[in-house]
Amino acid sequence: MFSRSGTTVKPPAWFTAALRHRPDHLDVEVDACRIHVRAWGDVGNPPLVLVHGGGAHSGWWDHIAPFFCATHRVIAPDLSGHGDSGTRNTYDLAGWAQEILAASAAAGESSQRPTVIGHSMGGWVTATTAIHYGDELDSILVIDSPLRDRAPEESRLRDRKRDAPGYRTRNEIIARFTAVPSQDVTLPYISDHIARESVHKTDRGWVWKFDPAIFNGQLFKQQPTEQETMEAMLSAIRCRVAYLRCESGLVPQTMAEKIRAILQLRGPFLELAQAGHHPMLDQPLPLVATVRTLLEFWSIT
């Protein structure tokens, strides 16, 4: 049961069933940094890599990944500076792309090339992975990543510091959890689960599981060069590519038409009705159905 502010909500059966599919947990070292990975399904299945957004972690996929583990080895890394992975002195998209390939190789044993799905900042990481390692990928799906804003989470998280005092109790910090960027709808049982996976205790108190230095302008260059824009990457990607826009997300209609024009006949442009920027928080089952349909389409073409 989920309870907040005196209100009790019973999570639906599909959600509790999904969370019963406990992931494997493993670590892989990439350029002297420990990268934590969640993985579901048989190691011999085709790899499906799920990449979280900025300030998030692999646990955002806990209720999504089990829907694919009958057919895929579902692999969700914590990018460096996020979740239970280590931190770095500097961060960049190319380094995170290297972590994606390393996580896929460490968590699976299939000879098939991975499909990579990335949300928000993770969509930028996914596109960068395709630019650098396109011949090693089967396909990619970018979810609601704006064309120019590499880290939509940055404006809300930029003022946090590595050594800032933490919260006194776990319940206190969990009560402060909110989607960044914000959206009108978040299903409470999902946000409660993710919030509990998003914190840990340190000598400063309870803190969020991400490195604040990523977003304060010190360690990660936010603005891309012209060659690094999403337009340039989508045009140059060598593997199969698709884009999923959330109807109430961060991609306005004019930008959506531009993305559709960039893709043309190279891959499908999809739209998820009623979804905010974080579809795993407000439209999880439509998100699953859309990705399942896309994977089936790719399997026969």
Image (cartoon, rainbow, N blue to C red):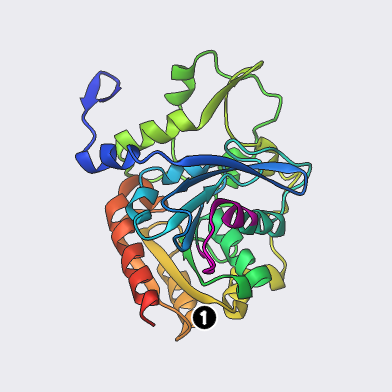
Q: Which of the image's four quarters has the C terminus?
A: bottom left
Q: Position of residue 139 (x, y in %)?
A: 50, 71
Residue found at x 64% / y 32%: 160
Q: Position of residue 172 (x, y in %)?
A: 46, 18
Question: Which of the 4 image quarters holds residue 249?
Answer: bottom left
Residue found at x 25% / y 18%: 6
Query: Can residue 108 be seen here?
Result: yes
* Closer to us: 253 or 214: 214
**Residue with the mark numbered 1:** 262
Residue found at x 20% / y 39%: 13
* Closer to us: 112 or 48: 112
Chain part drawn in magenta:
102-115
* Closer to us: 249 or 62: 62
Q: Is residue 194 above or below residue 283?
A: above
Amino acid type shown at disc 1? Ile
Question: Which of the 4 image quarters holds residue 82?
Answer: top right
Residue found at x 43% / y 65%: 252
Q: Is residue 12 above or below residue 110?
A: above
In this image, 297 relative to 206: left or right? left
Q: Position of residue 132 (x, y in %)?
A: 68, 69
- Callout 1: SS: helix
In this image, 6 relative to 265: left or right? left
Query: Can residue 149 be seen here?
Result: no
